[in-house]
Image (spheres, rainbow, N blue to C red):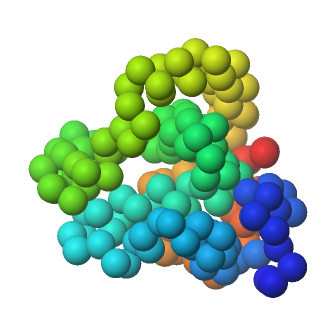
Amino acid sequence: MNNVSYQDLYSAAANNLSLGSALDLHYQFNPQFTRWHRYNSAEAKSLVKAHDVSHLIFGCDTGLLGEMQVQLWSKFAVQPMGFRDKMKYARDKESRVLLKNPVGYRKMAIFFIKNFSEVKRIRVKCAAMSKQWIYFDEDNYLATSLGEIRASHGIVL
């Protein structure tokens, strides 16, 4: 586990790591992020954990492009949430803060336009998956390797 680099963690090089080990490394490499269990509300805890796990299973680093990529994977490769679940997170004050755009809408729009090719690239990969990832179901996979998770869902990085 100690010989994994930041770049490796978000690539197929981490396929042998369990999801739980990879999540620990994710926080070690990104000390600026608050670990999911340190949030107060159950909604914020589950939202942060599911988002951070998505970085790992879909192989998206934590740079701005990686954040864009993880959002695209989440849109096209994750089972959609029901209306009640969406409202539960929208009503939670701590979750609403997490859902805000930290870089500003103008900068994000320009960045998105410059990297628009990522939309098609990721959409094609998502369409080839054998089954969608279920957000908030990560606890069932913590002892499973990233490679096994990716293979069982048809995720190709």
Q: Position of residue 94 (x, y in %)?
A: 21, 59
Residue 3's image quarter? Answer: bottom right
Relative to 109, say whether 10 is above or below: below
Q: Nearer the viewer, residue 99 or 142?
A: 99
Q: Is residue 19 visible?
A: no
Relative to 25, say whether 71 is above or below: above
Question: In the image, what residue occupies the spot 34% across and 78% down?
Answer: 38
Q: Nearer the viewer, residue 137 or 70?
A: 70
Q: Position of residue 101 (x, y in %)?
A: 36, 38
Residue 150's image quarter? Answer: bottom right
- Residue 135 lies left or right of residue 100; in this view the side is right
Q: Nearer the viewer, residue 24 or 89?
A: 24
Question: In the image, what residue occupies the spot 41% across and 21% down?
Answer: 106
Instruction: Say how many tags the image has.
Output: 0
Quadrant position of the C terminus in the picture: top right
Q: Position of residue 139 (x, y in %)?
A: 49, 74
- Residue 37 lies left or right of residue 93; in this view the side is right
Quadrant position of the N terminus in the picture: bottom right
Question: In the image, what residue occupies the spot 65% across and 70% down?
Answer: 29
Relative to 110, say whether 29 is above or below: below
Q: Is residue 63 visible?
A: yes
Q: Position of residue 91 (x, y in %)?
A: 13, 50
